[in-house]
Image (cartoon, helix red, strand yellow):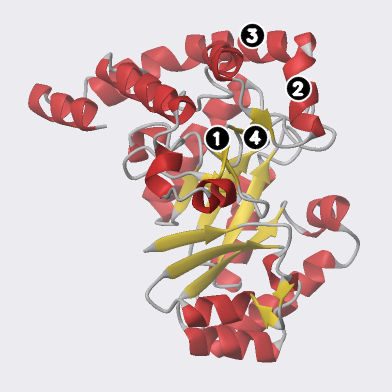
Amino acid sequence: RFIVISGGEPMVYRSHGKGILDIFEKHNDCFFLMYTNGTLFDKEAARRMAQVGNVTPAISVEGMEEKTDARRGKGVFQRVLRSMANLREAGVPFGLSMTATRVNYQEIFSDEFLDFFFEEQGALYGWIFQYMPIGRGFTLELMPTPEQRVWMLRRMWEVVRQRKIFLIDFWNSGPSVFGCLAAGKESGYLYFDWNGKVMPCVFYPYSPVNVLEVYKNGGNLMDVWSHPFFEAIRRWQYDYASKQGNWLMPCAIRDHHEMCRRLLETYHPEPEDEMAAAALQDEDYHRGLVEYDRRLAELTEDIWRKEYLDGMGKVERERVFLSS
């Protein structure tokens, strides 16, 4: 079983005298990917992680020192490097987590950045998360433009093929995972927050059900998975795939915002927080995402048809789309 832990910062978690590493140790039949700011791996923590042996930390950086410290605080970059040294010494495999914005998207794909982290520091993989306009201070102005997104697609595959660096972009790698993973799709996931709210995806902050309430009333995870809101999203995923939809635009909430809003208006899931509620009422936000989707479709449809669909045989094409 594979479980992803995200934040707040997992390394500061404490409950009844136990920390996150105690959870990993207890559930030794699982493997954990932990997203972390990477500042708290001293030698003892690194030694313990190596001993537990079922976790890999994905450490957040925003580029080189200037851009990382600008977002995460002065001195964070150097603390991250000390943590990486401790992890290397203990033999713990680690990777990177990078948020791509209009400001840093070229830097995180630059040879300087790749050489430093993957050759010198020993990172084994890199997750790229394009900035999503959710949460505190959400804005469309930091989101990579459609043109920048296509540039990142080209550059990512150039790096993967030529330098053999394992990079995956939560959006641009859509064809590699058969499209949107949200809402408990096969080989996909559901997102649970600490309060038990269940959402289609960490970037889709609207919850129709609370897992704690479901279990309190004698239910189980199948009752959660079967909620009509989640079923509607999975039905859209299947319909989109069966029509050979463009998996370079896989994301339900950002790349197909009009459809997403219709589902929210139909099923009325609870916003995770006040920011998610505010986004529902923001017409400029809505119009901006719809325009973003229109432009992205213009830029990627030919790429999808000519470079992806035309490169697949008829039998393989049917197998992939009908099984998704």
Callout in the foreground (1, 2)? 2
Q: Is residue 94 visible?
A: no
Q: CA distance from mark 4 to mark 2?
A: 10 Å
Of marks 2 and 3, the one in the foreground: 2
Amino acid identity at mark 4: Pro
Quarter of the image with the C terminus in it: top left
Q: Say which residue label 4 marks.
A: 205
Quarter-wise, where is residue 237 in the image?
Answer: top left
* Residue underneath mark 2: 279
| Screen quadrant of the N terminus | bottom left
Q: Are marks 4 and 2 in contact (CB under 8 Å)?
A: no
- In the structure shown, which secondary structural element does the residue marked by tag 2 occupy? helix
Nearer the observer: mark 3 or 1; the answer is 3
Which residue is located at x 37 percent, y 75 percent?
A: 29
**What x and y, as percent, mark residue 224?**
45, 41
In this rendering, the count of numbered labels is 4
Q: Whole-percent x and y of residue 190?
A: 48, 44
State the image quarter where residue 64 is shown: bottom right
Residue to which mark 3 is pinned: 291
Q: Are marks 1 and 2 in contact (CB under 8 Å)?
A: no
Crowd tier of the residue under label 2, counting other residues whose Cα lies within 10 Å: few below 14, some 14–19, many 20 or above: some
Q: Are marks 2 and 3 in contact (CB under 8 Å)?
A: no
| Of pointers 4 and 3, the one earlier in the residue sequence | 4
For the point 41% across and 13% down, the residue is 301
Residue type for callout 3? Glu
Going from N to C along the chain, the mark reached first, 2 or 3, is 2
At which x and y percent is residue 192?
Answer: 57, 49
